Amino acid sequence: MIKGLGQLFFIGLEGPQLQKHEEDFIVNNDIGGVVLFSRNVEDPKQIFELTSKLQSLTKKQSSQLPMLIGIDMEGGRVHRLKPPFTKWPALKHLGEVDSTSISFRFAQSMGKELHSVGINLNFAPCIDVLTNTKNEVIGDRSISSDPELVSKHSSALVRGYIKSEVLPCAKHFPGHGHTTLDSHEELPVSEKSLEDLKAVDLAPFQKAIRARIDLLMTCHILYKNIDPKYPATLSKIFIQDLLKTEYRYRNLVITDDLDMKALRSNFSKEDIPVLALDAGCDMLLYCNEPESHKVGFESVTKALSSKSLDNEAVKAKIESVKSFKQKKLATISTPSFEDSVNIIGHPEHLRLAKAISKGEIPEDLMLT
């Protein structure tokens, strides 16, 4: 097995407390990241203790690098943290307010609350352009149907998260705003051409790249006129040729959840992680099924042993993740729980969230 392979894996946990078998898997396999969901979060104290425990495990790992601890906190429907954390509105409201300074403050304020309990990565912002009004999967998670509007606010959101010491991860590359099917349940198929995507859906991703986005998340959509065989997550055309070569993106690419039925109904559980890495993805995300990441880890290990997966390419990915952590996480301060009490649900955060929801922004909040 290649040393440090686990750094390419992002895994979910069963509940609010770390189980012994989870701890052993994380340590023994040098796992690089953990994603938190509603089942894992109860209150600020519990979250802080869980993230602290996860970071303490890294001292026992072979890489001994900080753990990436991520969460889905977009605002609106996608909102894992309950009060006393600030309840943030959906991104649609930011598009309606149309102030980049407000979008920056939105991300910075949300990020401060995440950082205060030890979360260092947010799987946000969602920068899909909503070109299909029947698309309930994205819906109000999108800033707008106007690619220029989405682009300028995506840059502001990225900068806001970075300022708060939380790493942003823009999604869902190359665009999820025009589909009607939910990739959690089935594989969406798009008839868009590459020219169509470049004209609309890809514009915000280019802007986010220029804003130095740290991570991009792929989507499980089959663009049959561009790659008739593989969904974007598994497609060399999208990841290698377009994103990394044409757009010269140099940071990390992470998959959306590899257990979604869009993939699982069309590819074997064993083949999916191998295809994703071969396509150019750098990190593999497993969210909800407790044993899936173990199957994925074993499958990738076997593919490396049989040379069906390029060993040198995977080693390069491991080095990229390690270098990324050394560069990015080393500059993030370590929070104390005493400080978090004064940050979570801060009156100014509550005021900002309420103003955005109502679409009535006081002049003092509009100031940069």
Image (cartoon, rainbow, N blue to C red):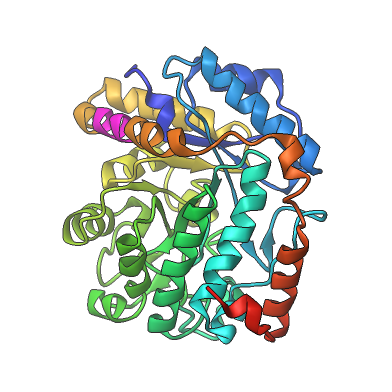
Residue 15 can be seen, yes or no = no
Residue bounds of the magenta highlight: 314-320
Write down the quadrant of residue 284 in the picture. Answer: top left
Q: Residue at x 50, y 39 (%)?
A: 332
Place of residue 342 in the rendered image (x, y in percent of width and height, measured from the top left)? 76, 48
Write down the quadrant of residue 213 in the picture. Answer: bottom left
Q: Residue at x 30, y 35 (%)?
A: 320
Residue 65 can be seen, yes or no = yes
Place of residue 257 in the rendered image (x, y in percent of width and height, measured from the top left)? 52, 48
Picture layout, residue 238 above or below residue 258: below
Place of residue 94 in the rendered image (x, y in percent of width and height, measured from the top left)? 58, 78
Q: Is residue 317 magenta?
A: yes
Camera-side residue of 164 and 368: 368
Indicate the quadrant containing the N terminus: top left, top right, bottom left or bottom right: top left
Q: Is residue 248 magenta?
A: no
Picture layout, residue 44 above or below residue 186: above
Picture layout, residue 74 above or below residue 292: below
Place of residue 126 in the rendered image (x, y in percent of width and height, measured from the top left)? 51, 65
| In this rendering, position of residue 344 left or right of residue 2 | right
Q: How many marks?
A: 0
**Main secondary structure found in the magenta portion:** helix
Q: Residue at x 22, y 61 (%)?
A: 247
